Image (cartoon, rainbow, N blue to C red):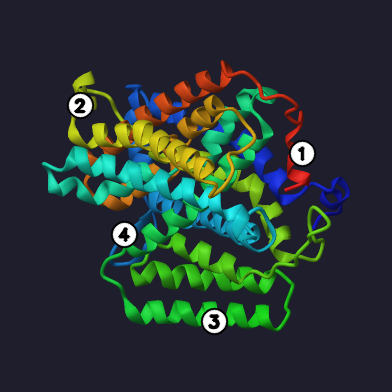
Amino acid sequence: MPTRLVGRSRSALRSFLHSEAMGGIVLIAAALAAMVVANLPATSEGYFHLLHMTTGPELSPKYGPMTLHLWINDALMAIFFMLVGLEIKRELIDGRLASWDRRRLPVAAAAAGMIVPALVYLAVVAPDPALTPGWAIPAATDIAFAIGVLALLGKQAPASLKLFLTTVAIVDDMGAVVVIAVVYTAGIGWGWLAASFGVLALMFLLNRRGVLSLWPYLLLTLPLWLFVFKSGVHATVAGVLAAMAIPIVKSPAAPDAIHSPLHRLEHMLHSPVAFVIVPLFGFANAGVSFAGLSPAILLEPLPLAIMLGLFAGKQIGIFSAVWISDKTGFAPCPRATWRQVWGVSMLAGIGFTMSLFIGGLAFPGNELLIDEVKIGVLVGSIISAAVGFLLLRTARPIADEPERIADAADHA
């Protein structure tokens, strides 16, 4: 790990919150830029042509020749999912999810926050079974976007809520990874899948042998990604699998372990993912042309189901789970007012990155439905962000709230 990082004693959690907050703001700007470019007469044609331009060989018959869009969604986003996997592993082994007592509330809230939006979606699209594959679109939460909105509130957003939203989103990411791997995988090439498991087994063997150097794991991640890509399982799953093989050194009495490969890699990936990869994904996937569209498109079953799932389903699911958990003694409410809990439950309805990603998997090759997904995700996320921001902006602060997120993170 770079000496300057160790010298500052910045924990992975604090680095994560900082980079996600700033990265979320960059992501918002990238999404807005994509919508502008996609609708300006001088740039719209070039924008869509660039995304679908052939830029490489055919690595898999399933996907055809590689395009810029494929490189972003299947290769760069594998790095994003590797960071997600590293965060999940750290939190489960040496973080806020290391014990069952700490897992109860985030797991309950995240589960309800995925199930209720999916049920809302399915209820709306019930008359059209062809839209059923998109049930997971509103079940996802975009942590970068949500933390970015919280960052705009400054100290008015309690540190306890920032940590609660982070842990819920991490558990939500676990669910999203499982959904992507299990639900949105078809036509598996078992030979390539076996080869990928062989590479993964070698990575775990290096872990067991106590190899703490990062470069062998990173080198093996390349063939792992290629074999998973060729197998038909979505290639981003390779990022999560690789993360699970990265060794971690526990650091219960310090922010980070200087010799922990997982902590080193997590610090290395935070900035590129937050400021380059995720905004680039947002720019490549948020662009939708509104030419010929009327406001009536919002009442079409697919965008309406996504909007209601994100806006209504998320807040109902998460807030209800927190309220029931607190009242039954299953898990205490975060240190915040109920209005603040409601506000952060609303912010969880910002699906954006993960929702757009799952939408592309749910309706592959159907540009019309994918455009409707984009509209539903964008509008649902914007409404959730705006209402959640207003709720938190007008909420009374809880007494004796720590002034700095760093203080809460140090005691996490």
Which residue: 45% across, 40% down? Answer: 318
Where is residue 82 shown, x and y percent of the image? Answer: 55, 59
Question: Which comes sooner in the sequence, label 4 or label 3?
Answer: 4
Q: Is residue 177 above or below residue 193?
A: above
Name the residue carrying label 3.
201
Mark 2 crowd level (few <14, some 14–19, many ≥20, 10 Å Cα): few
Mark 3 crowd level (few <14, some 14–19, many ≥20, 10 Å Cα): few
Can I make out residue 341 in this image?
yes
Name the residue carrying label 1.
406
Q: Amino acid at mark 4?
A: Tyr
**What's the distance in space between the residues labelled 3 and 1, CA to CA?**
38 Å
Q: Amino acid at mark 3?
A: Ala
Name the residue carrying label 2.
299
Name the residue carrying label 4.
184
Horizontal placement of 311 versus 96: left or right? Answer: left
Horizontal placement of 48 versus 84: left or right? Answer: left
**What's the distance in space between the residues labelled 2 and 1, CA to CA?**
44 Å
Q: Are marks 2 and 1 in contact (CB under 8 Å)?
A: no
Which-is-in-front pick, marks 4 and 1?
A: 1
Horizontal placement of 322 versus 233: left or right? Answer: right
Q: Are marks 4 and 3 in contact (CB under 8 Å)?
A: no
**What's the distance in space between the residues labelled 4 and 1, CA to CA?**
38 Å
**The quadrant where residue 46 appears:** top left
**What's the distance in space between the residues labelled 4 and 3, CA to CA?**
24 Å
Mark 4 crowd level (few <14, some 14–19, many ≥20, 10 Å Cα): some
